Amino acid sequence: MQFVDNLRQKPFVQKAEKFFPAIAFLGGFFWDSVTLGQMVENSDLIFLLAYYSGALILVILLSAHMEHPEGWTKDRIMAARAAAPRPQAKAPAPAVQAKAAPQVKPTPAPAPAPTSKARAAQSAIAARLNPFAKKVTKKVTDAASEKLKTASSQAKNVAQKIANDVGYESTAIPENAIVVEHRFLDREWSETWKNRFSWAVQFCFGSLFSALVVCYFKSSGSIASLILVILLAVLLVGNEFLQKKYESFGVSLAFLCLLGTMFLNFTIPYLVHRIGLILFVFSTLLSLGICVFIQKVSRRSKKVLIAPIAISAALITAYVMNWVPPVPLVLKQQVACINFDKTDYSCDVDAPSFLQKIGLKSSSVHRDADMPLYYLSSVYAPADLKAEIEYRWYYKGPNDATYKLTDRVSSGRMRINGGREMGYRSYSKKTNAPAGKYRVETAFKDGAVIGALAFEVEEGARDSSGYVRAHLE
């Protein structure tokens, strides 16, 4: 440990430590992008469940507050008494010796009234003693003030000791303390513990955001669903700056509701082998129900549920509008071609140009007027998951300003049976396709888009050197 401490004192190590959080953030996100989405193992879901469960427990702890600030629980009084300094034992009083009965003395005669000269002398003596009396009074007052400061400092130290020992702030026990029913969440955490809890919440939320951004991004196939992914990505970055905000119970509860819905919408299909609106609504209501449970346990005001309810309503609306990516479906491959061979899912595609290879130009398909056009795709789904997909053909002619939907193709053979690593393969055939620009979307039936491919059909077949043979694995 001494070696590590000496190493951390080096200037270059101190500069490098400033970049450790960013390196850890980018490294974790890169690892999630490589390992998640394409193939999700049971261990991945266990880790995500651990992050969500940890965040849930921490949010419950952050919900603690003094429901009766004027009252003291029995445990709190016992802790305060144990932490308070014990009074020192007083020395025993000396024994009282017996005295003889006092003798009665005759009452002295009253003193004669002072003369005018005596009164003048007394006034002169009083005038001389007055400054001396003021000095004595000031010394006594200063001494009493110093004692009060010392007592206040000792009381503060005792309160801080109680905060460190029992985990919440406290003060000396008032004489009229009201003993109330003890509840675990009926307390105020010290700043040290609040900081620890908020840091742990930030870590759990960041891990969930990182994994969900990757998974939802790989399932997004439209601009609308991509907007939701971008929102998650913004929150992922913002999470790095929200540690102190998470000390607010309302903020933590709102984030837990959002992440809970997205996490359950990703996990439940793995368990029941289905996806759809009913399951998404169930995921949303389950996440909201957990937030309501936390609010009941913590006895917080119902106002903290406004944000979770609004988030739940917005997510259900987004799903109905097909703005939520259809996780856990992931488009693996897609291609537009001619001369399709169903035995090995191979076909002829135009040899791509340099601009097409780097993605600056859409792919093209050259074919004779009587040749059918094919669109092939493979969609990954977890083992035993069943989902029906459809193809949506859009066409943009030479005189059209936008794409127009021309065909929606779906059949019983386009029902996914999950578990194949390279995805479930299917195709769509279009005859008499005029020249022009096309966009074909692979989508969950009557739902969100999984992926899309834009290409241009041109009249006139090429020679054999103008095509390459492609196939879906």
Image: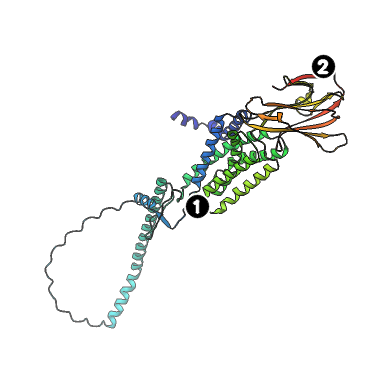
- Seen in the picture, residue 233 relative to 472 is either above or below; the reply is below
Establish if 126 lies above or below 430: below
Q: Amino acid at mark 2?
A: Ser
Q: Is residue 302 left or right of residue 389?
A: left
Front one among 46 and 426: 426
- Indicate left or right for 461 with 223 as reference: right
Residue position marked by numbered label 1 in the rendering:
299
Q: Amino acid at mark 1?
A: Arg
Quarter of the figure with the C terminus:
top right
Against 41, is 123 above or below? below
Q: Quadrant of residue 424?
A: top right
- Taking depth in this image into account, of 203 and 4 the one nearest to the observer is 203
Disc 1 secondary structure class? loop
Q: What is the x, y in percent for residue 213? A: 63, 36
Q: Secondary structure at mark 2?
A: helix
Tell me the number on the disc at residue 405: none
Residue closest to the eye, 405 or 5: 405
Q: Quadrant of the N terminus?
A: top left
Tell me which corner region of the image, top left, top right, bottom left or bottom right, holds residue 146: bottom left
Residue 434: give x, y in percent of width and height: 86, 30
**Spatial CA span between label 2 and label 1:** 74 Å
> In the image, what residue occupies the spot 82% across and 25% down?
372
Sequence-wise first label, 2 or 1: 1
Residue appearing at x 82%, y 19% in the figure: 466
Q: Does residue 428 appear to the left or right of 271 in the view shown?
A: right
Q: Please give the residue where the numbered disc 2 appears in the rendered image.
A: 465
Picture coordinates of residue 364, whole percent (x, y): 81, 26
**Percent from the top left, x then y, of residue 272?**
59, 35
Q: Does residue 22 appear in the picture of this structure?
A: no
Q: Is residue 374 visible?
A: yes
Q: Can you name the residue that lies furthest to the front here? A: 412
